Each structure stands twice: as structure tokens, then as C-alpha cells.
Amino acid sequence: MNVKSWSKTGLLACTSAALLAISACSSGAGTNNGNVGNDGASEQNNTNSKGSGVVTVSVVTSNRFLELAKEKYEAANPGVKIELKQSYEPPKTEGGGMVAMRAFGYDPAAVEKHVALVNSELMNGNAADLIMVDTLAYTKYADKKLLADLQAYMTKEKGFNPDDYYMNIFDALKYKDGLYAITPNAIANIWFGNQDRIKDLKLDPNSWTWAQFSEQLSGLAKKGGDPVMQYLPPEYFANERISENIDQFMNLNEKKASFDSAEFIGLLNEIKSYYDNKIFVEPDMNGKTGMGKAIKMGEKMNSKEAFINLKLTSFGSLSFGETWFAKPQIFAPPTEQNSKGNSFTAGMLLAMNEKSKNKDQAWDFLQFLLSDEMQSEPDLFGLPVNKKTAEAQISGLAEGENKLSPEYLEKAKEIMPQLTRFGGMEPKINDIVMEETALFFKGEKSAEDVAKALQNKITLYMEE
């Protein structure tokens, strides 16, 4: 897939084999990188400790949305400076641009440097006022009273009106009844069905389970012919499933894990069956079933798969189904039997330093990121958490070049209120899960051995 062709439409096909080589797919971090900020590794936070008009923001790498927010906020607030402290400066591309992301997240070197820098600054008491915590085990910082509970600032006295936002997003981010990080942009899963392939399947597009996915699509796969799903390596697919339902296997509040449960072992075997039953078939990289050509805007793909699973970062991208399939149908993602609502990831997560002497100004900048003005920016790279902005964007799609059908407009209105589960895992846990599950799918370990290893490693990590 040609990422440049689709990045502006606000949609990422994160479950496509074509994405294994791209450099802008997000698993929880903003990816539209703009001009770089100041290098946090070389500058100390000497201003906020004096309670001055400088708000420091520690980020892995800068992005265009934050750069725009800095420019606009400083213009509207003379005397206040927003300092974006960048932990890692990405290497230059041949064309002079920056490369900060890999196919499924930041460059590990960027993450490592940001984690080391933030750890050092927090422990030494000289951390930034605001901290990007997408790549950090921020709940551990919350346990150590290093991050502020932002609920204390979500009051009318502080200029915050809960009715203006999808509070279900913020509620899903709570930890131990506190809110230690917020996101200005949510990324939702959306599925498109190919009506030419699934017309005989008994599936409810608004509510279906993974059990139905397995049964119905296994039957479709037995008929042979075209692929049922776009290919994704099993460890990546498993990682998404586990992440979407992480509360079933981890209780961060109590520091307990249940990866050695029969439910988790069953999940691993269930996912393996998708590959054994040819729902997912690895493409022939050298033959006709390779990764495919680049996609151009407006090009009709007329793909033959039964379903595609995509990451939605703008409402307008619901029209993508019409590009992919001749007769598309929007589906909610499959859910576990007892799950409620849908999961989401965050374009970026921002936390406030509990020891900051500039909290009020820092909170004011956070609120600016949630304002109508910033939420309507194309560079938000995610769905707005601001209700007014989201509703305006959906209404605007009733006409114009990217017009959506009345049916799609109604679907768009349902997306944000249904995002009730945060599908983000702490980076270290994510790495452990990926490494261990890969061994199972390669046949090097049994499901039981992988479950036991995960239980031991993650329990040890949580207790550190």
C-alpha cells in the first residue's frame, strides 16, 4: 500500500500484508511527523520550576499537530511559550524528511531514548510539565505519585465541560479511579464486508462475535478460491486480540495476571485455527498473490477478500470501502462473547507531571488540544474526542466530493459513543506478548508453555 496516498484520508490498513513494509502505521502513537522540536536530551527543564510562562512538553518525536498547537497557542497567549522537548531526532530521509515510525510503531531506538530520558527526569524532579506517555508504563508513574490525576482539572472552574466531549473515551483510560493520561484523538477499528462474498453468511453487521467469525469464515474458506481475509502474521493478529481485551488477562489495579488461564490458552488455539483453516493465508511474495500495487486516490480496487479490517482515523474514510469492494458493507468489529462496546487506541497519550509548578498553564494547553479549533485540524490524525467537532465533520460529509451515503452517515454517528474499551498495552508487555506468542505460532512452544511463560514474565514485570 502506498502510505502517502492514504495518510491524508485518515485511514490505516493495519491488518494488511502490504503494511509490513510501511513506515507510518500507528499502534497508539501519532504518526504525522512535522518539524522537529528542541532536543530534550540536551536541554534541562529550567523554566517551569520557576512558574514562568513556559510550558514544556516531552515527546518521543514531534508531530505536525503539536507544532500547529504550539504556534496557535502562543499566538493567542502572548508571553506564554510552548517548548516541545524531543527525546529523539529521527534520521533524515533522502528527500530531507524525517522517519520516526516503523510499520507497527516507533523506531525502538526512539522509544528507548524517550523512556530513559523521562525516567531520569521524573526521578530527579526536573521532568517536563506535560509528558507523552504512549510508549511508557505510565501506570507505574501514577503509582509513584509522579503524574497528576487530571480529573481534578475537569471542572467548570477549570474551564472544562464534560458535555462537550466523549467522556467514554476518558473513562476507558482511567486507572485506579484516576485519570493520568488523556488523548485528543482516538483510532477506531472498522471492518468492511464484501457483499459479493458474504451475502449468504448469517452475520449481524452491528453485533457479531469471534465465534461467529470463526464458524462462518472457516466455512467460506473451505470453498476455496479468493482469500477470506487480508493476511496478517498470527503474532500480530494475536496481539490485537489480546490488546483489545487486555482486562480479561491483566488487572493492573491489583497487579495480577491470568495468562495461564484456560481462556487464554483457548484464545491462542482459536487464533491458530484461523490460519490452519485458511481464513488467513500467507501471500506468495514472488507470485501472483504478493503484496500488490500501490493504491492511488480514487482508484477502484475491486478486491475479492470477504473482509478487511482497518484503522479509522477520520470519518470521511468510511468511503474507503467503496474503493476496496464493488459492494461494501460496514461492520462493527467482532467482539468476545461478553464484551460490551468497541475498543480503541490513542493517537497520542499526554500526562501531567505531578511536580510541575506550572500545572494551570499546562492544563490550559491540554484543553487547547481538545478545543474546537485544534480538534478540527486535518493533522489531528485520529477521530476527535470533541463532540461538536465530530458532529460537524460528520454533517459535512452529507455533501461534497467525499459525500457519504445516509446509511454511512448514521454509522459514523455511532462510532465514538461505542468506544468504551482502551485497547492499548504498555510497550514492555506488548513486546513480551509478541515474542512469546510468535514461538507458539512457529510451533516452537505449546500454548500451555507460552501461557505459563507469559504469566511468569508479566507478573514479574508488574511487581517490579
Image (cartoon, helix red, strand yellow):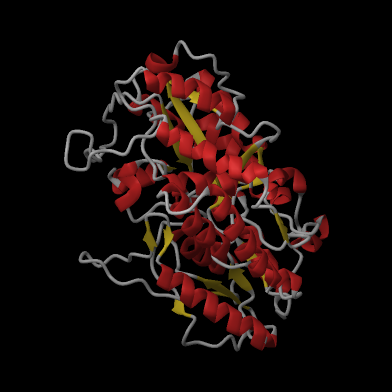
* Percent x, y of residue 70: 52, 67
Left or right side of 135 for 182: right
Left or right of residue 464, residue 344 in this image: left
Where residue 337 sits, quadrant-wise, is top right
- Residue 26 appears in the figure: no
Quadrant of the snapshot with the N terminus: top left
Q: Nearer the viewer, residue 293 or 370?
A: 293
Q: Nearer the viewer, residue 356 or 227?
A: 227
In the picture, measured across the screen, residue 255 lies left or right of residue 38, that is right
Q: Position of residue 47 (x, y in %)?
A: 61, 86
Q: How many marks?
A: 0
Residue 107 appearing in the image:
yes
Residue 219 versus residue 338 in the image, above or below: above
- Determine the residue positioned at 33% across, 27% down: 227
- Residue at left offset 34%, top offset 35%: 281
Residue 152: horizontal and vertical position, in percent?
81, 63
Where 318 sits versus 165, above or below? above
Residue 124, percent across and down? 65, 88
**Image quarter of the C terminus:** bottom right
Q: Nearer the viewer, residue 215 or 185?
A: 215
* Residue drawn at x 46%, y 31% as measured from the top left: 318
From this view, report whether residue 78 is shown above or below residue 175: below
Residue sitting at the far left: 287
